[in-house]
Image: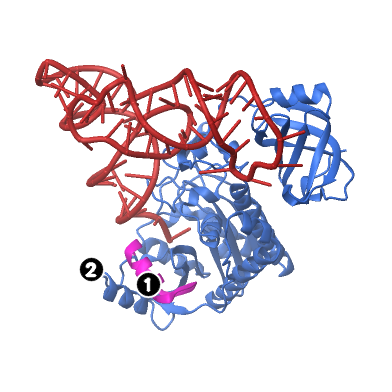
Amino acid sequence: MRIPIQSVTPETGHAEVCGFVHEVRDLGGLAFFLIRDRTGILQVTIPKKKVSEAVIAAAKAVSRESVVRISGVIKAVEKAPGGRELIPETFEIISLAETPLPLDVSEKVSVELDTRLDGRFLDVRRPRVAAVFAIRSAAMHALNDYFHREGFISITTPKIVAAATEGGTELFPIAYFDKEAYLNQSPQLFKQMMMAAGLEKVYEIGPIFRAEEHNTTKHLNEATSIDIEVSYADHTEVMRILEDVLVKTYEYVDKTCSDHLANMDITDFAVPKGPFPRLPYCEAIEIAAKKIDEPIKFGDDIGSAAERAIGAEMGGHYFIVDWPSEIRPYYAMPYENDPTICKAFDLMHPRMELSSGAQRVHNHDQLVQQIAKKGLNPESFDFYLKPFRYGMPPHAGWGLGADRLIMTMLGLSNVREAVLFPRDMHRLVP
RNA sequence: GCCCAGGUAGUGUAGUGGCCUAUCAUGAUUGCCUGUCACGCAAUCGACUCGGAUUCGAAUUCCGACCUGGGCGCCA
């Protein structure tokens, strides 16, 4: 019976382990093989005079990163890594790895991201890379767990949609039998319809697709979005939920992922402290105007340089609130006393935007007006507007970028590092 | 889409007109070595993205294509 390498201790006695050949050091009469599985690394020591011919033959034939099954006696040896080593009785090569390898798993020489992504399966064999995805998994678990505890209903909305109803971003057209269809840019309209369905609190973690021809370290053409929508809530209530779930996700990673963080050499993992500052848009552009050369006025988008300047000033996570209505989508609720600004917000990390959300317009006629004001045709929104005519609770929600969450949490320099198989302008394979 | 920087052994690099039969590390192959842990030692192998131009001579200069990295724009 195979046992995980982590559970091999000096007291184990007899053990069978399976894994990849991490490194080979042949000293002549004595050879050391490091065997690696997901849980750790075990030294297999072969004193050539004391093991069978079959073991020696296999040890000679095997190459680095081959898959092997080895069984034998565990000896407590102080000078061995982990204080124990395995003396093999059997040494089976299950799957021989070709040589040379497309990239160095043992990290003796550095590898460029492009090469890593081309050989992603080998890249992920490196403990520091596997750690990213173990932590991502833990973070996703914490998010799901939070939403279930708080009474959210998990939903799945279509990724194939009929029309580019939301405006803004470019969509990927696809062939759908004899019809024109698109990959969905966001679950926005569907999660709002679920408020009319009476589900009250919903969330979805799923893919979104954007056909923007951007080429940056923080954009992807296929991303994972964490979306919620809550009935009878306003923007302040969903902001509270957002900072709460973010802090709890960090706490869970901090509590359960110490080994993975150590594998990534992260020694200063810090759980952010809520509540996060609420910075009105007007004040945000004032900070930016003082620090950067480009002029910035009410109604302008906050560009990358401004974003970084404000982030440096704020130091940690913060919200930008009270955005100009003209630069937010039609479904954002304007303030009653000043409709030039609206109940929309962005959650910012000092490095970039993580999330945006708002209280939504729930009145049908107001929504039709706002759609028209944005230069869009309300008639093409019929499937979306219909639920607003039969009783729509007031509601609010947000969408949070999962990939950027992991990127900023772990200090990754490129969002592609947080995604197993990233899709960008140039990469469609693997 | 625009701007900038690049493309040299499997991997990461040095080399800016002749000193290049192209550097170093890692790797691969073979041999030696009984406590390695970036093992050591010896030998061997392996590369100038593609096409055109300039030149007596091009990895190096120029033009085009393709590819990569970064920045910007765009991105409810």
Q: Which residues are magenta?
A: A303-325
> Dot 1: within a 10 Å radius of its alpha carbon, few (fewer than 14), some, or many (20 or more) residues?
many
| Residue in view at x 41 percent, y 70 percent | A311
Determine whether A202 is above or below A86 in the image. below
Q: State whether residue A281 appears in this view.
A: yes
Determine whether B48 is above or below A135 in the image. above
Percent position of residue B41, x then y = 53, 31
Determine whether B7 is above or below A370 in the image. above
| Residue in view at x 54 percent, y 78 percent | A236
**What kind of residue is marked 1?**
Ile
Determine whether B4 is above or below A321 in the image. above
Give the secondary structure at mark 1. Answer: helix
Q: State whether residue A324 appears in this view.
A: no
Q: Which chain is blue?
A: A
- The tint chain B carries is red
Percent position of residue A374, x then y = 36, 61
Percent position of residue A230, x then y = 62, 69
Q: Pick whichever, B76 or A74, lies toward us.
A: A74
If the image is split into quadrants, where does the N terminus of chain A sit? top right
Q: Pick whichever, A109 or A266, lies toward us.
A: A109
Query: Mark 2 to mark 1: distance in Å?
Result: 14 Å
Q: Which residue is mark 1?
A: A310
Q: Which dot marks residue A293? A: 2
